[in-house]
């Protein structure tokens, strides 16, 4: 009887602890995300094996869509997984590169539209453990590296589109982009009649069965087996129903602090933030909702061996500052090779961004949107405290007359310095605004940050 009482008491205490767990508000869950401002997207999977080429032809469009764009049969695509053997995969190096670049979180494609899981799963044999020579879960060592370096880890998961697991949805769009085959007319006719599918193997189950048999159990595994999951990044809700979305959303209780985006199902499942893709919204498009621009370094998300059209570090740093000045986050993509390496161009870009962020990251992290909108010469971010406001003016185009004018800024100035050097700057104020007297030469050729501390708060202009 005594043992029974002790056992029941222990159970009661555990239940009390569970019920007493604080339910986090959205603001509490979003706090770290709003302060981070900069993260890394990673698109990786079997599509890195063909690397944009199928049957001797370069297939147009983004690399991770090659199965869909080239209408590759399921058996042929799955056979390519035997070549997916990322022996050069070094998650420690990946995460350190992200950290050194100034990124605060990573979101990786745990399963993209090709249905291939980068993790060990009991829900489908179409995964890295059962389907490749590599035979090891890729996400567990990444989770360990993120924990080591203090980087938050998120998972992209394609909840609806799945071109390999039977019953998964497929895009209705019929395209011959990159496809120069006499059979393409027949293939296109089939896809029109079969809800986007092009292979009978894709239709051996219903969509509802796919949700129950694959999507729900895999998401449960992701939210159970990898420690703290910071973000769940849904994508392309083709064929999604409220019932299916509810089943998936219910699983989020396994990670009470998790953040999700707006792509589970539209409408009715808004998530925590919007996801403009490959573009930075105009000020007029912003409505106060949290948002995150995701963008590629070149023209593709998944690796394509022949896409070397990379954006410059200058462009990407300016994009980061433009996004931060509007109150958003920047999720910048890397597409690793099938060997598990970041392309050298991506590594060089990350290094250059990291050099800039090491000096000037204060102008990005934990900042809010500019009170003035945009300037012709650059961008502004701000931080507020009880005693005043800190303004960061990131100057892209150094004024030829050595004067930086901030119309409408009438608050008293406590200090003005060059963030990179600490050099103090002279300012003059008038009824029209503030003028900052700059050095003759910009300290940084990409963007020089002028830090100005003023008394009081600043109303949006």
Image (spheres, rainbow, N blue to C red):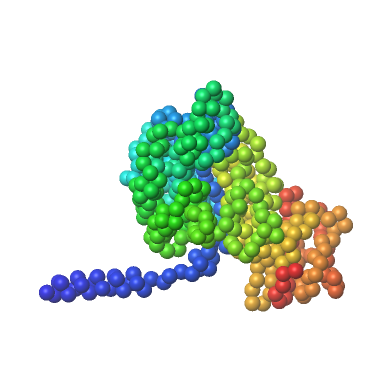
Give the answer, above or below, for where 136 lies relative to 261.
above
Furthest residue to the left? 1
Residue at 58% x, 61% y is 290
- Camera-nearest residue between 374 and 91: 374
Residue drawn 59% across and 58% down? Answer: 291
Quarter of the N terminus within the rendering: bottom left
Image position, residue 197 (x, y; %): 46, 37
Q: Residue at x 83, y 56 (%)?
A: 399
Instruction: Place residue 357 in its image quadrant.
Output: bottom right
The quadrant where residue 73 appears? top left
Q: Is residue 417 left or right of residue 272?
A: right
In the depicted structure, whether residue 134 falls above or below residue 106: above
**Does residue 14 appear to the left or right of 231 in the view shown?**
left
Front residue (pair 340, 97): 340
Front residue (pair 119, 218): 218
Q: Can the viewer see residue 103? A: no
252 shown above or below 455: above
Q: Answer with the quarter of the image where residue 117 lies.
A: top left
């Amino acid at each position: 009887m005594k043992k029974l009482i002790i056992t029941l008491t222990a159970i009661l205490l555990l239940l009390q602890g569970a019920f007493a767990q604080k339910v986090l508000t959205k603001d509490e869950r979003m706090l770290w995300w709003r302060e981070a401002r900069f993260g890394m997207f990673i698109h990786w999977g079997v599509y890195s094996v063909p690397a944009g080429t199928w049957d001797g032809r370069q297939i147009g469009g983004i690399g991770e869509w090659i199965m869909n764009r080239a209408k590759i049969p399921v058996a042929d695509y799955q056979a390519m997984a035997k070549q997916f053997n990322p022996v050069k995969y070094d998650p420690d190096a990946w995460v350190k590169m992200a950290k050194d670049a100034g990124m605060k979180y990573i979101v990786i494609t745990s399963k993209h539209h090709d249905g291939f899981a980068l993790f060990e799963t009991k829900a489908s044999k179409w995964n890295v453990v059962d389907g490749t020579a590599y035979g090891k879960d890729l996400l567990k060592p990444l989770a360990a590296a993120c924990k080591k370096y203090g980087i938050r880890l998120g998972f992209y998961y394609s909840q609806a589109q799945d071109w390999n697991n039977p019953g998964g949805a497929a895009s209705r769009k019929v395209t011959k982009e990159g496809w120069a085959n006499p059979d393409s007319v027949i293939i296109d006719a089939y896809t029109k009649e079969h809800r986007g599918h092009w292979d009978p193997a894709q239709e051996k189950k219903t969509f509802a069965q796919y949700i129950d048999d694959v999507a729900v159990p895999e998401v449960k595994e992701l939210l159970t087996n990898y420690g703290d999951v910071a973000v769940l990044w849904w994508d392309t809700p083709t064929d999604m129903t409220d019932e299916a979305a509810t089943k998936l959303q219910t699983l989020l209780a396994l990670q009470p602090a998790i953040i999700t985006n707006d792509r589970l199902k539209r409408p009715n499942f808004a998530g925590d933030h919007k996801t403009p893709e490959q573009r930075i919204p105009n000020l007029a498009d912003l409505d106060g909702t949290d948002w995150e621009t995701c963008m590629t370094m070149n023209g593709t998300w998944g690796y394509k061996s022949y896409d070397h059209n990379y954006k410059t570090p200058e462009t990407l740093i300016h994009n980061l500052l433009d996004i931060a000045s509007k109150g958003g986050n920047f999720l910048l993509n890397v597409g690793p090779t099938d060997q598990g390496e970041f392309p050298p161009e991506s590594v060089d870009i990350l290094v250059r961004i990291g050099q800039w962020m090491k000096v000037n990251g204060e102008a990005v992290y934990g900042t809010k949107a500019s009170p003035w909108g945009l300037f012709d010469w650059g961008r502004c971010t701000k931080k507020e405290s009880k005693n005043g406001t800190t303004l960061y003016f990131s100057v892209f185009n150094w004024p030829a007359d050595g004067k930086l004018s901030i119309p409408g800024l009438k608050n008293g100035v406590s200090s003005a310095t060059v963030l990179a050097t600490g050099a103090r700057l002279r300012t003059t104020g008038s009824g029209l605004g503030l003028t900052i007297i700059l050095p003759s030469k910009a300290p940084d050729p990409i963007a020089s940050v002028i830090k100005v501390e003023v008394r009081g708060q600043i109303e949006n202009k």
